[in-house]
């Protein structure tokens, strides 16, 4: 199976032997791979170019992978798969809560990792549309441009959202005033195995509320429907984006 031309992966792991062997394997699978041995190198590469996905180790000297993922979630909508020896459920939950898209425990079969990469990319890829027909979503003074993955407030200021937050918001915008239960949201946002960590949905919704609600402790846009799930209580308009 060939990859879309130019599919770029940033691989961040302090174990040089594992990192280089995995990078070689991914290149043979058709990916373009850049390597970083720590968070400082990763931040530099992120500042120099764009990537489609990050493979991120958690346990690294200096800044760890959780901190780096938190930084990326606050600054860009970029899918993240954790690759780590820490396999406890609590670690997985934390990783998903702060913006990770999947979690692979070392040692792993590289074929499984490639399958997970492709799955995450399928969920994250932008749908090809003609520029003239590109739509933006408008709701309660907010505007979301799905092609650019850019969320702006009523003053035009850009608010950074993570890849998972973007997909969560898209789910609500495509189903306004409809109750979406956790299972359905998990399928839309996290994909397979996420049902093991259903608390991640509640935490991601809390994160999203802090960004779009006037008072996140008294949410008016994303409302909790007791016993049912969550609902976007807002009118959503789709308009043509700039040509």
Image: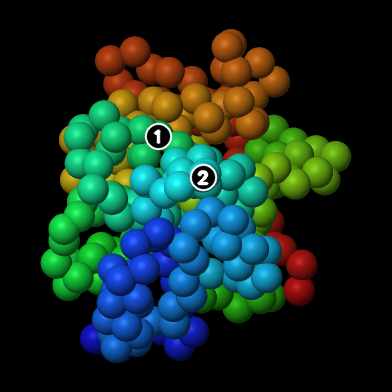
Seen at 42% across and 66% down, the residue is 11
Residue 232, image x and y in percent? 50, 30
Residue 189, relative to residue 222: is it above or below?
A: below
Pointer 1 residue: 97
Q: At 80% across and 38% down in the image, what residue appears?
A: 154
Residue farthest to the right, as pictured? 155
Query: Does 40 sit left or right of 8 as displayed?
Result: right
Chain-order first, disc 1 or disc 2: 2
Q: Is residue 26 visible?
A: no
Q: Nearer the viewer, mark 1 or mark 2?
A: 2
The x and y percentages for residue 164 are 45, 46
Residue at (34% x, 13% y) in the render: 226
| Label 2 crowd bin: few (<14), some (14–19), many (20+), radius 10 Å | few
Q: Which residue is denoted by mark 2 in the rendering?
A: 62
Per the image, label 1 sits on a secondary structure element best described as: helix
Q: Nearer the viewer, residue 98 or 62?
A: 62
Disc 1 residue crowd, few under 14, some 14–19, many 20+, Cα 10 Å: many
Q: Secondary structure at mark 2?
A: loop
Please indicate, yes or no, whether residue 150 appears anywhere in the rendered image: yes
The numbered mark at residue 180 is none
Residue shown at the point (64%, 63%) measured from the top left? 44
Q: Quadrant of residue 40?
A: bottom right
Which of the two residues, 97 or 88, is positioned nearer the viewer here?
A: 88
Q: CA distance from mark 1 to mark 2?
A: 22 Å
Q: Quadrant of residue 29?
A: bottom left
- 45 to 98, vertically: above or below: below
How many numbered markers are drawn?
Answer: 2
Please state, as top left, top right, bottom left or bottom right, where the C terminus lies in the image: bottom right
Q: Which residue occupies the foreground of this view, 36 or 83?
A: 36
Image quarter of residue 142 = top right
């Amino acid at each position: 199976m060939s990859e879309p031309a130019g599919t770029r992966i940033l691989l961040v792991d302090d174990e040089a032997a594992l990192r280089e062997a995995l990078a070689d394997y991914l290149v043979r699978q058709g990916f373009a791979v850049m390597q970083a041995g720590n968070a400082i190198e990763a931040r530099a590469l992120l500042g120099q170019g764009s990537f489609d996905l990050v493979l991120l180790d958690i346990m690294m000297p200096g800044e760890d992978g959780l901190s780096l993922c938190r930084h990326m979630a606050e600054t860009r909508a970029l899918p993240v798969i954790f690759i780590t020896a820490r396999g406890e459920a609590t670690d997985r939950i934390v990783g998903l809560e702060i913006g990770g898209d999947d979690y692979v425990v070392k040692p792993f079969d590289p074929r499984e990792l490639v399958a997970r990469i492709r799955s995450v990319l399928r969920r994250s890829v932008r749908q090809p549309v003609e520029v003239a027909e590109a739509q933006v979503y408008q709701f309660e003074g907010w505007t979301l441009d799905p092609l650019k993955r850019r969320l702006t407030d009523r003053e035009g200021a850009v608010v950074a959202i993570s890849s998972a937050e973007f997909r969560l918001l898209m789910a609500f915008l495509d189903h306004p005033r409809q109750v979406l239960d956790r299972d359905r949201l998990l399928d839309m946002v996290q994909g397979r195995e996420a049902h093991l960590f259903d608390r991640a949905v509640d935490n991601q919704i809390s994160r999203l509320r802090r960004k779009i609600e006037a008072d996140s402790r008294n949410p008016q846009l994303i409302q909790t429907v007791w016993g049912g799930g969550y609902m976007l209580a807002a009118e959503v308009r789709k308009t043509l984006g700039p040509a």
